[in-house]
Structures are given as structure tokens and as C-alpha cells.
Image (cartoon, helix red, strand yellow):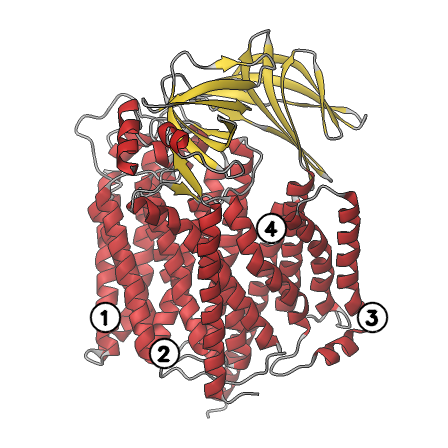
Amino acid sequence: MLAEFALAALWLAAALAALQLLAGVLVLSEKALVLGGIVRPLAVVQGLLALAALLGLIGLFATTDLSVALVAENSHSAKPMLYKIAGTWGNHEGSMLLWVAVMGLAGSFVALVERRLPERTMLATLAGQAFVSLGFYAFLLLASNPFARLTQPPPEGNGLNPLLQDPGLAFHPPTLYLGYVGLSIAFSFAIGALVTREVGPAFARAMRPWVLGAWIFLTLGITAGSYWAYYVLGWGGWWFWDPVENASLMPWLAATALLHSCSVLAARDALRAWTVMLGVVAFSMSMIGTFLVRSGILTSVHAFAVDPLRGKFILALLAINIGGALTLFALRAGSVTEGERFSVTSREGALVFNNVMLTGILGIVLIGTLYPLVTEAVGVRVSVGPPYFNPVTALFALPMMLVMMVGPLLRWRRDAPGRVARAQGWVMALPPVVGVVTAAVFIAHGGIGLLPLIGLSLAPALALASLLPLRGRDLTRLPLPVWGMVVAHFGIAVAMAGMASDSAFSTERLIAAHVGEETRVGPWAVRLAGVAPVAGPNWTAMEARLVVRYDGAGATTLTPQSRTYWAPPQTTGVSALLTRWNGQLYTVMGEEVEGDRWQLRLWWKPFVPLIWLGGALVALGGALALLGRVSADLKRISVRTRMADRRQRQGR
Amino acid sequence: MLKPKHQRMVLLAAALTALLAAVLIAAWALRHQASYFYVPSEIKAHPPEADRSVRLGGMVRRGSVHNEADGVTVDFIVSDGRADVPVRFAGIRPALFVEGSGVVAEGHMVQGRFEADNLLAKHDEKYVPREMAGMTAEQARQTVAQTK
């Protein structure tokens, strides 16, 4: 019964979305103003119904109801409970249901708490949200029904891909989706503002927390996904420029640009049309990502279904949503005036530069991701990887980082480099000096590629420069959003140091070792102490016992495994990692080869955890900024209600 | 400071310039950096430059897998039914790397031998590298026919 109830909830949610769209349009066209009051409640209930459908599916997976086709195909009764639940979104239909549930809930949340926008803009926003949701409801109900029943339930399910049987599955997809789909709010805000032509600082201030929220989750989701791929794939790499990774990076780049242009619009009433455009682009990138990942056009661990109908369906949705939004933009952009002026050397100027460079990177990544699909259509098969993406994105990222060092020190509207230099004094010289000295040291060290060298010297300079906005300010009274900016920029420097250090200093060792044999990788001595069989709930494994010592220090034991799952039958390596303050030892076990030897692949990766620490800092910076903005808004609202109360009491 | 109208033009021009630059740079870089997919008969007929990274796909010829004495290097032959290319790979092989099955190797040609940095074999029934989805010896031949 649960499956039928959940499916009914989903249909009902779709119907309410249609009603929400209709009511919004009728009110906006002033045909039925009386409907104005029902749009918000509709949005709230619609989101709750979508959530109910998702909870229903989670229930079916948790109890392994094999009469549901999706559960039978993707689950197994012997799986640990964590993977039964997380496995709900480890397949095409379930992940799309997660998508619409997040989208519905985001709409509910906006409808419940957003009170700053003019009511007409708000209605247009909710109508826009309903329009986009409706398309995805249709996709789910007509082309990807997660609740279809089997007439003949099988005795046991097929199980879940072992690569996905990892705690990462419980965290990475939901976080990423909160970010991905959270951007639909920015999209709908942009639509709402275009429909009512209300693009100004108030609009930017209302939109900013929503963009920030989505951006924080997107940052966390990408960081978590990168770490997951790093330890689960056993190749020692943390970013592969795989199309599915690019699909998450592109919305992040657009959202980062949007975040910065939002603050220009909020503080200075400039970049109106540009901000609206980015709002459209950011969620469009989410949808393009979904198309790439979910249509079956790419085959990867993320692409679950190869059903041409689904690909065409998503493509049609994409064309309608993006095409519609861009048409609306083209029609209305002319009447959205540019707003306040500013000179090139100003905070706005630096932020425009940041935006333009981020857009450039976005273009580079988009072209590189789509290129193989285009050439395949004409019969040439290519793959585009790090040799293209690394240098070409760096071409745009490096100037951006340099401007990022001074941008936060500039004043709004108009500034002069001389003024900044006088205000900061000798401290201004510190980042460039540190950068040059670091570069000199590493050039003398030798053997480091150009890009890692630039990264290694830029990172400390950037870290120092990111702290400069704190100088001469009373730290106890500094607004939270400023702290957020400092922490996030510092996080970028930290992540960059980790990336550069990984590619400059990683050492690798590949051997076939006898039990008892010792080998070295970097400063580590690694001894294969033994190999023994072990068993888990739905797998058996050969487990190597590695006794490892750092530079003569005490011994620790690591246990990488070669694991064989029996549902589905598949062998996969499970790496074992040891983290020190100065890096990570990464060990992978291979197969047994002749002469009673076992293959081992070992890496010493100095400072590599800084990559994910940096990502977490960037997200933390976003959280601080969000906290600051929201608490300021709440304070303003409470002051306003108090004033209104007093006025009422005094009978005015 | 510029007039509002001019400021708008300048911003628009800056954005368009950056986008155009991105497109041009991308086009130039893709021409030089994209890694092309070859099947054995193609790579024999038109070998890529030595330093260029490419992908080679085909079937692992039965009986051709030979383990070197160091225990981590493997030599085998990738075939598309028309031509054979010897491949050498040092590393931990994917679990589903077996004789008679499809494989895609990433690497470059060194004096008639393909030095693979990485092997992409089927993960399982559902998840396969894009180039070899459902590839059998017959389909590998068809691939050659199509790409001619």
C-alpha cells in the first residue's frame, strides 16, 4: 500500500504545482486577484507531498519491498540498513524523486519565510518555481515512475553497485542536490523579477540568502564527492574532469559569480541585468548537468538509465525552461536599467572582473564537456581530460586570484591604488614578497611543473592577502559577512596549496611484495605483515596487514582490502588511508601474483587533505555570511514589528 | 566615470570579450589536447605523435596476457579483428580485466607498443566506459567501419 500512497502523493503534488502556476498567472494578469492568497499555501503543501513521496520510497527501500520494481532492481535484503536507505537515491528514479522533493521543499520554504519581496514579484517567483517543478513532476510520473509494481516479485533483489556502498552515498547526493536544486530558487527569483520588472537592491538582498544557502550545499557536495572519489576509486586522484564532475562544477562557478554580483546589486544598485542573467544561468547549468548525467548520454557510475525517451524528455524540459527564461530575459533586459555607475578601480570593478573570469572558466568547462558529445555525433570519438582543463582554466583562474587579493581592500564606487597602498602600508608588500620568495625556493628545489609551482607560490600570498581586510578593524564588532568572505577566500588559498602540493610532491610506489617484505614510499617504511581473508555482511575479502612507520616513528597498521561482493557479484579494491598533519599515506591492494606475492600500490601525498579542508572552509565562510545576513534581517523584522505594535497601542 | 549608457556598453563588451576569448582558447586547446579514441587498425595505419595521449580500445586477445617477473607489469595484445597492438601496463588491473573481454587503455604509443597509464575495463554489467558500451569483437570491427 505504501507504494500506492506515495505515488498518489506525487500525483497530488503535481496537480497542486499546476494549480499554483495557474493561480499565479491569473493573479498576475489581474483576472482573479482573489486567488492571490492561495499561492503560498499551495507551494507549502506541494513541497510536503513531494517529501511524503520520497519518505514513502525510503520506507520501501528500508523494508526491501521486492514487489516494487525499483527496489528489486537496486536493493538486496542483506545490505546494511544505511545502504538500504541511502540506496533510495542510488538509482535513476530515486535520484529524480530526491530532486523533485528538494525542489518542492525549497519552494515551500520560500513561500513560508520570504516576506521582503513585493507580493507580485513573490507570486511570479512561486509561479516560476511551479512551472519548473511541473516539468520535473511530468518527467518522473510519465517517464521514470519509481513506484511501479512487479506482478511477480523476485525472491531477492539485484543489489547495489559496490562502488556506491559507502557512507559517502548517504551524504554526497543529498548535499549536492540541495545545492543543485536550491539554485532553482535563484532562477525563479530572476523570472519573478523579470516579469514584474522589480530588479533592485531589495531584490538582491532578498535573493542573496537563498543563493548563499544553495552555494554552501553545492560547495560541500562537491568537496564530499571529490573526497569520496579519491578514496573509493583507488587511483589516488581527487578530480578527474569527468563530465559528471564538471556537471557539478559548472553550477558552482555560475553560483559563485551570482553570489558576488548579488552583493554589488545589494550594496550599490549596479549590475542589474547581469545578476538576473546569472540567476537564470546558474540553474540552467544544474539542468544541463542533470541532462548530461541522467539522460544516459554519458556512461559512468552516475548514469543509471539508458532509455532514449528519458534523454529526449530531459532535453525538452531543458529547452523549454532555459529557452523560455532567456526569451523573457531578452524581452525585458532593455527595460532593466543599468543602475549606479562606478570606476574601474573600485570594489565593483574587481567584482566585475571576478564575474567575467568565472564566466570564462564556465565557458571553458562547458565547451570541454560538450565537445566529445559533438564530435561523437559526427563519428569521431575523443575524450577531453586534464591536459585540456588544467592549463586552460588556469589561464582564467590565475588573473582572478590576483584580483581577489586586492578586490576586498578596494572601496565601493571609486578608489585609487595609491589610497589602498597608503592605508595598508608596508603590509601590502607582504603577499607579493611571500609569493616571490616561495617561487624562488621551489625553483631552486627544481623538478616542479609550471602549474604546481604557480599554485605553491600563489597559495601563501593569497592566504595572507585574504586576511588583510581584517587589519585595523575591531574584530569583535566585525560583521559576520566580512568574516565569511575572509574565511572563504582563505579556504580557496588552502585548497590551492593542497592541489599544488599533491601534484608537485606526491610519490608513488608499485610493487609485488612477499609477506614480510618491506618497502619505502617517501618518508614511510611499509611492511606487508600478512594477508588474511575477512568477511562482511554482503562481501568477503582478502585483507593485507601493512605495518607502516613514518621516518622511524612508531608503527601503525593499515588494512587495505580486495573485496568481493556477492550481490551483484563484483570485486572492488578498498583503499586504506593514514592521515598525518603533513599529508596522507594511501594504500591499495591488488591481486596475488606468482611467487606468493601481493600487488601493492602506495602513495605518499604531502598536504593533500588541505584540498578538502579548503573546500570545507569555503563552505564555512558561506555559512558565516548567511548567518550574518539572516540575523540582520531577523533583527530588522523584529524592530519593525515592535514599532508597529507601539504605533497601534498609541492609537495612530 | 562613464555615463550609465556607456558603462553598460563597456560591461557588455567585457563580458563578450571574455566569452569569445574562452571559446577561441578552448577551440585551440581542444585541437591540441583532446585525446582521440583509436581501435588497433587505426592506430597502426595512422599512429599519433609520440607525446600525444590517446585512448586505445578493443578486445584483449585470448592467450596474449603475459605477466612480467616484477609482478606488477602486464603485457597483452589488443585486437579489433584486423590488427593487433601490443600493450604494456604497470599497475593494479581492474577486476574485470580478462582475456577475451573489452578494454580501453589510456596512454601513448612508444615505438610500436602502447604504453598504458591507465586501464578502463568494465566496472560491471551496467557501468562501462563510454567507448566500449557493449563492445564485442564484431562491434569493434563495426566501429572501425563506421569511423572510416
- The disc, 1 or 4, on the residue closer to the chain's N-terminal end is 1
Residue A414 figure quarter: bottom right
**Which residue type does callout 2 highlight?**
Ala
Q: Determine which residue is flagged by label 3.
A: A426
Could you say where residue A69 lies in the image, as x and y percent from the top left?
25, 33
Q: Determine which residue is flagged by label 2.
A: A333
Q: Residue at the bottom extreme?
A: A652
Seen in the picture, residue A433 relative to B119 is either above or below; the reply is: below
Q: Are marks 2 and 3 on the same chain?
A: yes
**Which residue type does callout 4 highlight?**
Ala
User: Which numbered dot is residue A616?
Assistant: 4
- The disc, 2 or 3, on the residue closer to the chain's N-terminal end is 2
Chain of the residue that carries numbered disc 4 in the rendered image: A
Q: Residue at x 50, y 73 (%)?
A: B14
**Which residue type does callout 1 highlight?**
Ala
> Taking A127 as reference, is B68 left or right?
right
Q: Are marks 1 and 2 on the same chain?
A: yes
Q: Nearer the viewer, mark 4 or mark 2?
A: 2
Q: Cα distance, mark 4 to mark 2?
A: 37 Å
